[in-house]
Amino acid sequence: MTALPDPELPDHATGPAPPPAPRAIPERTRRAVLECYGEQGRRALAAVDAGSVKRYLDFVVVVGTRDEYIVEGDLCTCDRSLFRNGFCWHQLAARIAVLADLCEEYDLWYHAALE
């Protein structure tokens, strides 16, 4: 005998719950980032969309075009930030991802991930 589904329960109540809907950056926010930051904004949004921002217990790390860059506060380990004392798209991507809760989360220290 086959059990009939309970009309009071949602379809997934008898099985595993569906995955949560993916979070996204609102279009209004995207336009504002692009208007304010231009090319750096475009690169930062692309990194966030690609899932290239990782949050470890100690640092936020952005996967760039040539390397992974540690971002902490107003500092980044990329050449632009270190040698030219400039704001870079890695910093912007880290800020956007953290604020929008779009980081790939790692429950370990970054130096442990390097080993």
Image: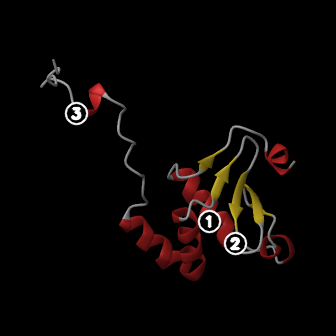
Q: Nearer the viewer, mark 2 or mark 3?
A: 3
Badge 3 or badge 1: first in the primary sequence:
3
Q: Secondary structure at mark 1?
A: helix
User: Which residue lies under the disc numbered 2?
Assistant: 88
Image side of residue 115 versus residue 32, left or right: right
Badge 2 or badge 3: first in the primary sequence:
3
Residue depicted at 28% across the width and 26% down the height = 14
User: Which residue lies under the disc numbered 1?
Assistant: 92
Image side of residue 66 versus residue 101, left or right: right
Distance between the Cα atoms at labels 1 and 2? 7 Å
Residue depicted at 73% across the width and 40% down the height = 57
Residue 46, percent across and down?
Answer: 54, 71
Image side of residue 9 versus residue 93, left or right: left
Quarter of the image for residue 91 reads bottom right
User: Which residue lies under the disc numbered 3?
Assistant: 11
Labels 1 and 2 touching (C-beta < 8 A): yes
Name the one closer to the observer, 7 or 22.
7
The amino acid sitting under disc 2 is Cys
How crowded pointer 1 is (Cα within 10 Å; few <14, some 14-19, many 20+) is rated as many
The amino acid sitting under disc 3 is Asp
Residue 50, percent across and down?
Answer: 55, 65
Residue depicted at 38% across the width and 61% down the height = 26
Q: Secondary structure at mark 2?
A: loop
Labels 2 and 3 touching (C-beta < 8 A): no
Q: Looking at the picture, does residue 105 appear above or below residue 53? A: above
